[in-house]
Each structure stands twice: as C-alpha cells, then as structure tokens.
Amino acid sequence: MRYAAIDIGSNAIRLLIADITDNDGIISFKKNTLIRVPLRLGDNAFLDHFISDKKSEELIKSMVAFRNLMDVYKVTDYMACATSALREAENGPELVKQIKELANIELEIIGGQREANIIYSSHFEQTLDRKKNYLYIDVGGGSTELSVFSDGEMLASKSFDLGTIRILDNQDKDETWESLKEWIKVETKNFRGIAGIGTGGNINKLFKLSEEKDGAPLSYVKLKALFAYLNSFSLKDRINTLGLNQDRADVIIPACEIFLTIMKWASIKHIFVPKVGLVDGIIQLLIEKNFDQK
C-alpha cells in the first residue's frame, strides 16, 4: 500500500510517496520517493499577489508529472496542500481549478494554523522528554508557525506572515516581528528552561552543516557561529564552495535569522531537529483516516 503527499510551498513544491506497513496493528510508513521542485512561487505571491503565467504553467506541468508518478507507483490515497504563496495569490483559487482539470489532483489551500496542525500530526513530540517544555518553530518561505508544548500537550499555537522569501523580497513587516515577539513573551513567560523544536528544509540543512549527531540538539551558540560562517561567504561562494543548492543558498540566511531571533526572545539555548515536515504530517493524516475507517 502506498500513499502520497504533495506540499506546494513558497520556495519549493514536494511529492512524497511512502510505503505503508501494518505490523500486527502497528501502522507505520517508510519514505519511498521524495521529489522537490524549486518553483519559488513566493516571489510572485508576496510581491504581486498573483502567480505569473510562466510560474502557473510550471506548477501545472509539475502537478501533471506528480499525478503520472502517483499512477505509476500505484498510490492508493493522497493529499495535496498549498500554503502561504497560493493563500496570498489572487489567482490561487483559479489555479486549484486548473490543477483539478489538467492534473486530476484535488488541491487544498490551507491556513497557517492548519499547516501547523498537519505537521504536528507527524507526532514528532513523542520522541521528546514529556517532562520538558518546548517551543516548536517551523520556518517556511512565507510563514512561520509557533507552538508551545508542556507535558506533551500543545498549549498555544499561532502562524505569522514571516518567512525566508518574504525577507528576501523585503516584504516582512515591523509589526509582524513585534507581534511575534509579544506572542513569545506572553506564551512562554510561565516556563523555565524551554527548548526548541525546529522543522523545515533550512533548519534540516543547518543541522547537517553543524555535524551534530542525529538526535542531539543544536545549541544557540553553535547556530549563531554557523550563521556568521555562512554569512561570510557570498551567495556565489555558498553555492560553489559550500555546495549549497542555488535555491537553498539564499534562503538559509534569513531562515537562520528567524530561528536565532526566536530562540533569543524565548531564551532557548538548544533546539532539536526531528527532520519532519508537512509531507510527513500528511502521510500520517492519511494513515489515521484510512485505518480509522477500517
């Protein structure tokens, strides 16, 4: 049995095809194929509030390709979600219709809170110490989702229109930063020794560059040093010398800034990086939907 998850983000779109196994009633999945296409829809959405004809054509071609791959892999169920770029594009709903007609894919444009809830569905919190307090931080191209966990329970959650593509395009607003700071102050004031949980492609790459062991946290001090190191290279050298992909080499800098700022405001000294994202949460939702029905 195979399920598929599609994530249409502001920086890239992804298709995850996962194999589902049932081991004496314990349902789990293993990643079979992950495809990432760096469309960067956010450049259109945040500057023009419209996805251009060129980008729209590329998106639809990608969705047709994803549909063909799902058919070849004999995927039995799927879920496709679009986040902040299509949320803000005036022609987002029209693109949803075209994707249905031309690629036969049902696409849902989701809000920031729904996005956070889907990622939470991956149950990354189960691997952490329930006695500790955590601030979950997901940084994307167009939005940042924050959630406070204590004793294994989510106590507060909020999405902010602050992301890597917005910063690169100078579309981040002072009031958004202030709102973020105030929310962190209010929601974390009763907790001591709060740790971070970071998700998203950029923090995954930063963790890899840090050379920390899997499962070990990344310290604020090390992340700050890594930020300074990356910032000492030009964009060209981050690509040619450090070997970063072109669509990662620029966004990794504002991503680092967002994580460091949030960690500073929340007095977080260490952040865990479970390497999960929206597609992982979607697969888990499909498992719960299908196996609950049975």
Image: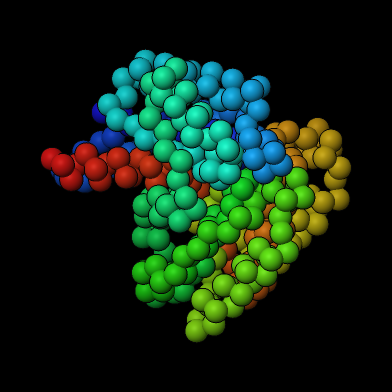
Query: Is residue 88 visible to us here?
Result: yes
Q: Is residue 3 left or right of residue 6?
A: left
Q: Nearer the viewer, residue 61 or 71?
A: 61
Which one is in front, 294 or 92?
92
Find residue 107 and report its image quarter: top left
Image coordinates for residue 122, horizontal then vertical, percent:
38, 50
For the C terminus, the quadrant is top left
Q: Is 56 located above or below residue 42 in the figure?
A: above
Q: Is residue 209 visible?
A: no
Q: Up-down: is 28 above or below 125?
A: above
Residue visible at 69% across and 38% down in the picture: 48
- Considering the image in quadrants, where does the N terminus appear? top left
Task: Provide residue 163's location: percent of width, then percent of height.
Answer: 64, 51
Q: Nearer the viewer, residue 236 or 145?
A: 145
Image: 145 above or below 132 = above
Q: Measuring 71% from the left and 59% from the top, which residue is drawn there?
A: 173
Q: Which quadrant holds residue 237?
A: top right
